[in-house]
Image (tube, rainbow, N blue to C red):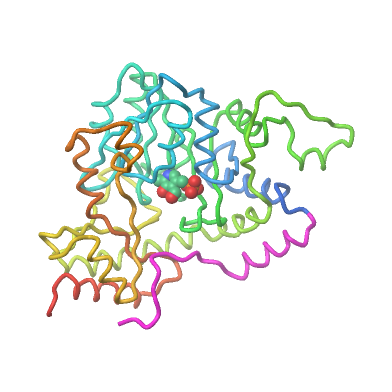
Amino acid sequence: MRREFLPFTRPSVTDAELSEVADALRSGWITSGPRVEAFQKAFAEYIGVPHALAVTSATAGFHMLTLALEIGPGDEVVTPSFTWPSAVNMIEAAGATPVFADVDRHTLQLDPGSVRDVMTQRTRAVIPVHFAGQPADLDSLRALATERNAILIEDAAHAVGTEYRGQIIGSHGNPAVFSFHAIKNLTTGEGGMITTSSASLAERLVSLRFHGVNTDAWRRYAGSARAGYDLFEPGFKYNLTDIQAALGIVQLRRLESMNSRRTELAALYDHLLAEVPEIERPARVSYPSRSAWHLYQILVDRDRAGLTRDDFREELKRRNLGTGLHFLAVHELTYYREKYPSPPGRLENTEYIARRIVSLPLFPDMTEDDVRQVVDEIRDVVRPGR
Ligand SMILES: Cc1ncc(COP(=O)(O)O)c(C=O)c1O
C-alpha cells in the first residue's frame, strides 16, 4: 500500500510560474493590468479567436453571458443535468428555466437526440458541456439550435486544448467559457476565460465585468490623466488579477506539454484497465476529436464490481488513493429536485452514470508507477481475496 496519499489531482506549478507571479507582485500593479492583457492576448491566439476575456471564474462568465445575451424570464435553456451546477445556477439566477437533457450512456456527452426531445418554442439557448475533456457533438447541436433559433453557448470548463473535428474548442463561432479553477488543466487558482468572435458581445462583457463602467482602472491609469469614466448599466466585479494572470501566462505556455502528459497517463490507464473487466471505462466519442483529458473516469457498478461506487471510493481512500466525484445529477440535488421534479427515468442515462462514476487520479506530475499502483489496488478492491 502507498505510504503517501495520492490525491485525485494536484496543480502542476514550476519555478517559471513562481517567478512570473513574483514579478507581478514586485511590479507595483497586482490587479487587472498588463499581465491580464497579455494572458488574454496569448489565450485568444492559442484558440484562434479575436476576443478572449479573463474573468474570476467560469461561473462569472456564465452569469455575464446570460445578461449580455438577454436570456431571462420566460426563456428555457437546455443543458445536461450530468454536470457541475454552475451554468444551471446562472440560468436560474437570470430568471430563465433550466431544462435538462440526457447524456450518452457511454461517452457521457450531451445527447443531441435528448436535446431535440426537450426543445420547445421557448428554448433560447443550449449549453453543452465538453465533458471530462472530450468534445460535445457541436455540429448536431448547432443544427438543432439553428432550427429553433436558439443560441449555443459552450461550457468549456473541462476543455482547454480539446479539439472537435480538428478545430480547437472555443473557436467554433459560439461563446465558450473556460475554467481555471484549481483542478483544471490550466489553473490560475480561480479564474476563467470567455472566448467569442463577436466584437459587440466582447464589448458588452468588458463593461459588465467591471461595474458597467466603460474603462477599467488599468486603462485609466495607462491612458490620459484627463480621461473620466461613465456607467451605462449596473455591472459586476469579475475581473481577474495580474497575480492570477501571471500564473495563467506560464500555464498556457506549458499547456500542450501538460495535456500530452495527461494523454500518456490516460493511455496507460486504458491499457491496464482493459484487463479489469469488473470496471467499465467510458467510450470515446465517434467523431474526430482530441481530448484534453481533464478527468480519467470509470464506472463502478455493484453487480459487476461487487461493491457500490461509494464503498469503492472509501476502499481506495483506505489505501491512500484519492478519487473525485464528477458529478451527481443536478436534477437530483434538493433545490432542483423540488423546483423541477423530473419523472424517474426521464434522465435515465444521467441517473445511471451519476450513481456509478468515479474520477481516478490524473495530473501531469503523476508517474507511471502511480497509475500502476492505482490499477493494482482497483484490481484488489474489485476481486477481494485474490
Ligand atoms: C462543467 C463545469 N462547468 C462550470 C464549472 C465552473 O467553473 P468555475 O469554478 O471556474 O466557476 C465547473 C467547475 O468545476 C465545471 O466542472
Q: Which residues are magenta?
A: 1-28
Report the residue at 47% width, 23% height from top: 72
The percent position of residue 49, horizontal first and vertical second, equals: 55, 38
Queried whether the magenta region covers residue 16, the answer comes back as yes
Q: Nearer the viewer, residue 47 or 136?
A: 136
The answer to whether 302 appears left or right of 155 in the picture is left
The answer to whether 287 appears left or right of 146 in the picture is left
Answer with the quarter of the image where residue 375 lies: bottom left
Q: Nearer the viewer, residue 340 or 361?
A: 340
**Where does the C terminus fall, quadrant-wise?**
bottom left
Answer with the quarter of the image where residue 79 lies: top left
Whether residue 371 is visible, yes or no, is yes
Vertical relation: 351 (above or below) 150: below
Vertical relation: 8 (above or below) 293: below
Report the residue at 36% width, 25% height from top: 145
**Where does the N terminus fall, quadrant-wise?**
bottom left
